[in-house]
Image (cartoon, grey):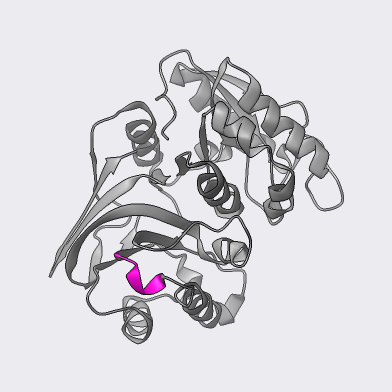
């Protein structure tokens, strides 16, 4: 199930299902608003998005109220998250998945929002989108690339060929092959929180899009390695059709050599694996569909990614 694409003048609702909008610095908010004011869309903010508690978030009931109201409102065509955080998984038992299924909307965000994107897809079949937060448009870092990728995915129906940003330079083939399949994934450590719950998407025959950010300091590579191992030990993981890794911050130490070693030890050798794609916690980023279909072609120095349905 794919929600209607955005059209000029559509209303986009900002919600804060993780951290509060109140933590955003004023200059970032100002720059983000400049983008949205020029975008041709109507931006509105949820009732409780600035509520702030001691965890830089808000109550479960407030966050659920805002999400349900956004899905219920017929004028709202897209829901974009304000920022990430650490506690979106608190919301999963309280979401009205029937309401969401009956009122399909574009839902976009990343990082901690990986929880909502994959859980909603798993429970309803609604395609969701790993892509910018509201505040992403307030930061530098090749912003034109992020904006164009966002609009390509959310306003067009035709297949999209993903090409490297200037910042990324190129994408790297770690294992050769060709595959086509349904996308799940996002932030790895967040996605793994769904394991063993009713909200984890079926991993069988999927194409994994995986990234992570450095909250472990010098131990990042160890944490990433064991989190990837855990994901690949899920029942059905042996049928995964391909893996696409995002870009990592420099302080992650995730060099081409390091990620190659990790893949060699853990990933079946007969599936395509590509590294360094423009998504993750470093700008610029693409927008990609959780539940959409992708075709991966990995041949020597040729790494091609085409979003077929989004």
In this image, 116 relative to 51: left or right? left
Tell me the magenta residue range. Answer: 237-241
The stretch drawn in magenta includes residue 239: yes
Which residue is at a point 64% across and 23% down the rendered structure image?
Answer: 72
Q: Is residue 296 above or below residue 161?
A: below
Quadrant including the N terminus: top left
The stretch drawn in magenta includes residue 38: no
Query: Looking at the magenta stretch, what is its main secondary structure?
Result: helix
Q: Is residue 154 above or below residue 131?
A: above
Q: Residue furthest right?
A: 54
Give coordinates of residue 168: x percent, y percent. 31, 57
Residue nearest the viewer, comparing 218 with 204: 204
Which of the 4 image quarters holds residue 4?
A: top left
Which residue is at a point 24% across and 71% down the rendered structure image?
Answer: 271
Which residue is at a point 51% across and 75% down the rendered structure image?
Answer: 224
Give coordinates of residue 73: x percent, y percent. 63, 19
């Amino acid at each position: 199930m794919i929600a209607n694409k955005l059209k000029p003048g559509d209303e986009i609702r900002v919600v804060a299902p993780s951290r509060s909008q109140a933590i955003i610095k004023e200059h970032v908010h100002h720059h983000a608003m400049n983008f949205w004011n020029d975008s041709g869309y109507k931006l509105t903010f949820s009732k409780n998005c600035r509520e702030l508690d001691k965890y830089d978030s808000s109550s479960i009931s407030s966050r659920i109220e805002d999400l349900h109201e956004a899905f219920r409102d017929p004028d709202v065509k897209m829901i974009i998250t304000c920022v990430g955080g650490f506690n979106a998984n608190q919301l999963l038992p309280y979401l009205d998945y029937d309401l969401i299924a009956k009122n399909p909307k574009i839902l976009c965000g990343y990082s901690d929002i990986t929880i909502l994107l994959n859980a909603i897809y798993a429970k309803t079949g609604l395609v969701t989108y790993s892509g910018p937060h509201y505040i992403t448009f307030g930061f530098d870092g090749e912003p034109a690339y992020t904006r164009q990728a966002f609009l390509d995915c959310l306003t067009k129906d035709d297949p999209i060929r993903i090409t490297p940003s200037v910042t990324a330079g190129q994408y790297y083939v770690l294992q050769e092959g060709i595959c086509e399949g349904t996308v799940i994934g996002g932030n790895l450590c967040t996605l793994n929180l769904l394991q063993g719950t009713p909200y984890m998407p079926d991993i069988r025959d999927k194409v994994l899009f995986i990234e992570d950010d450095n909250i472990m300091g010098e131990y990042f590579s160890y944490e990433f390695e064991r989190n990837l191992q855990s994901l690949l030990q899920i029942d059905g993981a042996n049928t995964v059709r391909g893996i696409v890794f995002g870009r990592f911050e420099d302080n992650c130490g995730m060099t081409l050599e390091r990620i190659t070693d990790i893949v060699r030890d853990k990933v079946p050798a007969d599936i395509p694996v590509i590294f360094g794609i423009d998504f993750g916690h470093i700008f610029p980023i693409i927008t990609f569909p959780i539940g959409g279909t992708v075709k991966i072609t990995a041949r020597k120095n040729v790494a091609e990614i085409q979003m077929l349905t989004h």
